[in-house]
Image: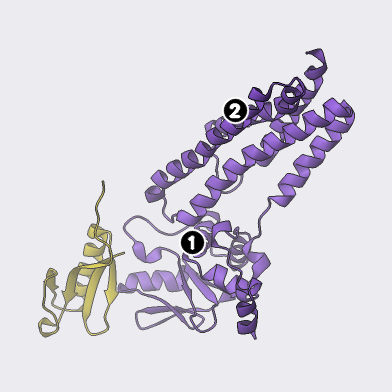
Chain colours: A purple, B yellow
Amino acid sequence: MAQFFQPIVLGISLGFVARFYMLRVDYRMYPTFPHGYQIHLSLGLIAAALGAVAIPALKTKDYAAVTFLALAAQQFRDIRNMERDSLVSLEPLELVGRGAAYIDGIAKVFEARNYLAMLTALITSGTALYINGWIALLIGIAAIILSSKLMKGEVVGNIAKVESGELYFEGADLFVSGVQIMNVGLKASREMIRENGLGVVIEPKDDNARETLGMIGQRQAIAHTAASVLGIRKDTDTQEFTPLIRRNINTGRIVMAIVPVEKDTEALIEAVNRTPVLENNKRCPLKTQAGRIAED
Amino acid sequence: MDTRLADTILAVVTTDRDKVGGGAPIFYTENEYELEKVANILQRATTSMAHDLGNGVYILVKH
């Protein structure tokens, strides 16, 4: 039993560190601090423990213990549902909602990160058992860095060029750089938008980006991010100040009108640039021959 | 379960009696100032949005 002590402790420790490293507080305030954190760290510890004991269990020919890994995977699937349910129930209470696609993305990430913690623990304990503790430590750290690098998704800035757009009214109709956004009936609201509103134009870099940015879930994620970074001049009884994103149906370019608390174009462009490209909204027509023919 | 109306005309506010009719509640106003004021109050009370049809008729739509 003593021979397994070091591999298991190393595996659990590095698996736990992996989970901890992947939890970071940012503008999204998700997971919530401190209780949301505590939940995910505890689950991360369990995942790391499961990963760390798998190879020692196999070595002692305790195959039943390994089947527990499969059982555990089932349990971790519940994390995704837990996150999704909680975010969906909070959605009506957001001034600018995240949208179902963003919520699904967040939920998936939480599930996947536990598997990464489990995998890091498994690799570390295996290396410690068959090679030695120091090499296991290095391999574990490399696994943490590699997994956080590989799991880093794209952001809107990678697939599109974001520029400031001209926001103006034609009668009661609000436009941003030639694309009609909405009809605003009240003169006072129009004045407010004219004075404090900002417009951005998001120009897709290729056909893949054009289709991805056209997805409603992706647009909602951009609006949510911009509103949470710059603040939003909106209350529950002023729907006209909801940030709206519309698409130029001829070019695929998308435009957004927003009435932020901080009227700062540069900050808005940066916020849009940093919005994650949602995994479930990604479209790749250029991967097909038909898509490539259609491109030119 | 919370059931709500969406993308439906909740009310019509107008200064011109000849231009409107139908099922939604209609509010007649004397002038443009009153039109704006009534539309604003209705918009906030019903958490909907006023749209200007450009012919002296405002509709309140819940989105």
Indicate the quadrant where residue A95 lies. Answer: bottom left
Q: Is residue A161 left or right of residue B56?
A: right
Q: Residue A244 versus residue A20: which sits nearer the camera?
A: A20
* Residue located beneath label 2 in the image: A42
Q: What residue sits 23% from the left and 58% below the top?
A: B45
Q: What residue sits 58% from the left and 49% below the top?
A: A27
* Residue located beneath label 1 in the image: A217
Q: Is residue B55 left or right of residue A214?
A: left
Q: Which mark is residue A11?
A: none
Q: What residue sits 55% from the left and 40% below the top?
A: A31
Chain letter, disc 2 residue:
A
Answer yes or no: are tags 2 and 1 on the same subunit.
yes
Amino acid beneath label 1? Gly
Q: Position of residue A63 (x, y in %)?
A: 68, 24
Q: Relative to A232, does residue B1 appear above or below in the rendering?
A: above
Point out the residue furthest to the top here: A2
Q: Is residue A68 left or right of residue A21?
A: left
**SS category of the residue bearing label 2:** helix
Q: Is residue B20 left or right of residue A148?
A: left
As measured in the structure, the alpha-carbon distance from the residue carrying label 2 to the one carrying label 1 is 31 Å
Q: Which badge, 2 or 1, is on the more N-terminal residue?
A: 2
Q: Relative to A14, does residue A158 appear above or below in the rendering?
A: below
